[in-house]
Amino acid sequence: MLYSLMVFLALAPVLRAGPWPRAPGEQFTSITVEAPTSATAVNQVYGALYFERGLPREWTLGLDSGADGLGYQKSYAFLRRPFFSGRSSRAAIELGVGYQSSARGHGFAIRPALTWGRGLEVVNKPGWLTLDGSAAHIPFLETTIFKIEATAGLSWTDAFKTFLQATYEQETGRPAFSSITPSAAVQVSDSFHLIGGVILSKEQKTKVKFGVWMSF
């Protein structure tokens, strides 16, 4: 188990670090596009930018933003810091402030979040598991968007990783949305990965996901 944890810490610079803090000055950027497989749904293409920078005393500063052609958009600046550290797991608390769209409109939002993660080993391969929960509250609209994500990943080689993400999201008074996203990441250089996946959901058309991870 200690070996799995050490592998996760080694992978953290090229992954969304979850509850594991980045070293001061270390940075990570993810740029992704989610595109429907139907040509008639091109306005549902969603682009996202995610950024993290390690700060002193285990703080992480970040940016989480995205938008599609239908008018949905979000943009948060956040701070995160661990509050629990066990033998193989760690938990962190996060607070984000920014702008969020919802079914009722859009406006200023506050997004507290909790994240938990641990290293693991499957078929003698090192991997990781993270759980993330958040509640994006838009005060002026009196609505809250609850979101839970579970991600399990496996490193088959130093240059090839696969992971599976399950997402559940629901806004106050609205139907829930859920999806499963199997993905893979291929290392191109020490600081650059290509990623691809498929987003499967009963509530929306199937989408393909592709993008890049960069660490520096």
Image (tube, helix red, strand yellow):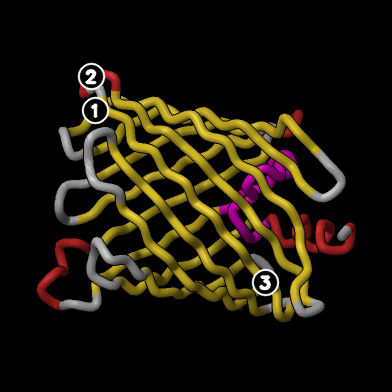
| Residue plotted at (35% across, 70% down) | 200
Above or below — where is 216 with respect to 139? below
The kind of secondary structure element at disc 3 is strand
The kind of secondary structure element at disc 2 is helix
Cα–Cα span, label 3 and label 2: 42 Å
- Image location of residue 15, percent across then percent down: 62, 58
Q: Which residue is mark 2?
A: 140
Mark 1 or 2 closer to N-term? 1
- Image location of residue 21, percent across then percent down: 71, 41
Q: Which residues are magenta?
A: 13-28
Q: How many numbered circles does the render carry?
A: 3
| Residue plotted at (39% across, 74% down) | 198
Above or below — where is 60 with respect to 200? above
Three-letter code for the amino acid on which mark 2 is drawn: Phe
Task: Give the image quarter of residue 211.
Answer: bottom left
Mark 3 or 1 closer to N-term? 1
| Residue plotted at (65% across, 44% down) | 116
Numbered disc in front, either 3 or 1: 3
Q: Which residue is mark 1?
A: 107
